[in-house]
Image: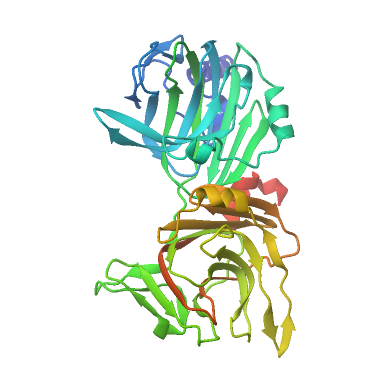
Amino acid sequence: MRKSVAVVMLIGLLACLAPNASAADAEDGFVSLFNGKDLTGWVKRGGSAQYEVQNGTIVGKCVPNTPGNTFLCSEKEFGDFVLKLQYKFIEPGNSGVQFRSAVRSQGDSQRVYGYQYEMRPGCDMTGRIYDEGRRGHKHGLIWLDAHTPKDRLDAAKATCNEGDWNDVEIQCVGPSIKTWLNGELVVDMFDGEAMKGFIGLQIHSGKTGSVAWRNIRVKDLGESKWEPFFVKGDDGEYRLSDARFVLPEEWSFTEDGVLHGVHAKSQDKDGLVISDKNYGDFIARVTYRMNGGNSALYFRAEETEAPWVLRGYQNEIANNSKDSAIWHTAGIIDGKTIPGRGWVASNDELVAKVRNKDGQWNTTCTAAYGDRLVQILNGFCTADIIDEDGEKTGKLGLQMHGNTDTEMFFKDFEVMPITAEMRKAIERETATDE
């Protein structure tokens, strides 16, 4: 008798979970974002598309020839997470899943912007990352995951269940963004534009399009935070945090927190900001403006006896098409010169498109993850390489090159370490893998 009651209770539990979360997902820490009955917890933004609940699914339908894309957005925001859901095209159109997204006013309406998992009938390009309302189509570039190999796209497309349900998975851990289609990895990229935001179900404007979604569930992994090197003290003055100056007389902060550096050609030693800590796996970024000279964002660098002090990788800042290229510099240790390797990666053609012109602010970003090095300039990936021969840890730094007249302005210099715990989440390591 007790066994029969237990069986009945188990069947009841599974019935409550379906179709929006399986028992396994519930045990793994996934929480349903859709109750299967109504749109509680969601809000519509943007255009005129219509959303309703049909047979335990959310169905979005395009209203033909009306302006603007439409999004059904989660009220809750997520930073690091794993999102799983299923979708099916009822009528051909264009759609996607927003994540780490936000909204701004646009006339009398609202404009959703942020990362989008692309969805198309036939699964062409499905799983790629488009930046809705922000970087998408800027400079003629469509996809943020510019380095996704074609064979991976083809393998994912081959799994397509056209006209039937397909499985979507999105994982964000700090700067790491990964997507899957029907269990096949599509995108594996690093980006630093946004670390938190809402999830959204898109219906693209046009003549037709209807999509159903179900089994929408998420595992919340917390939120990764940037750590600033420029901080404002209780006295209202800005200063370095976890870093120090080389040639401090060349550096000063403005009232609004911009670090201003002036270096004379007669000084053969580099003016530097050097982190106190070593960083192995991380993402770092800084916004800069320069008036002549040469500069860099150092990473995985060691201090040496050389006049330029640091030996290691440089994210080049040159005010030309070599911005965001990777240079590996030499050093002097115990009186002996340890050679560098020169240019490791560059992308002059793309940089010429995305770099803001002389006198304007640019934001450069480096992600280092094991042997993988990723360079991003003004939000666009300029390099994504594997470099097995380089250093695996070291200092971060900002440079004013010696023996040249240089004037630099830096703001928002910050780092996000990728911890061992984050790496386990990125690689999906479990206790049994250790």
Question: Does 114 sit left or right of 1 as displayed?
Answer: left
- Residue at image position (39%, 25%) is 71
Q: How many marks?
A: 0
The correct choice, above or below, for 402 with respect to 236 in the image is below
Residue 4 percent coordinates (x, y)? 58, 14
Indicate whether 398 appears above or below 372: below
> Could you tell me residue 6's position as x and y percent?
56, 19
Colour style of the rendered protein structure:
rainbow
The residue positioned 70% from the left and 46% from the top of the image is 432
Residue 33 can be seen, yes or no: no
Residue 326 position in % (x across, y down): 63, 62
Q: Quadrant of residue 298?
A: bottom right
Does any portion of residue 168 appear in the rendered image? Answer: yes
Q: Is residue 427 above or below residue 246?
A: above
Q: Residue shown at 32%/67% (left/top)?
A: 257
Of the pair 49 and 179, the residue shown nearer to us: 49
- Find residue 406 and report its horizontal and vertical position in percent: 46, 75
Q: Residue furthest bottom?
A: 335
Quadrant assignment for the N terminus? top right
Q: Is residue 78 above or below residue 9?
A: below
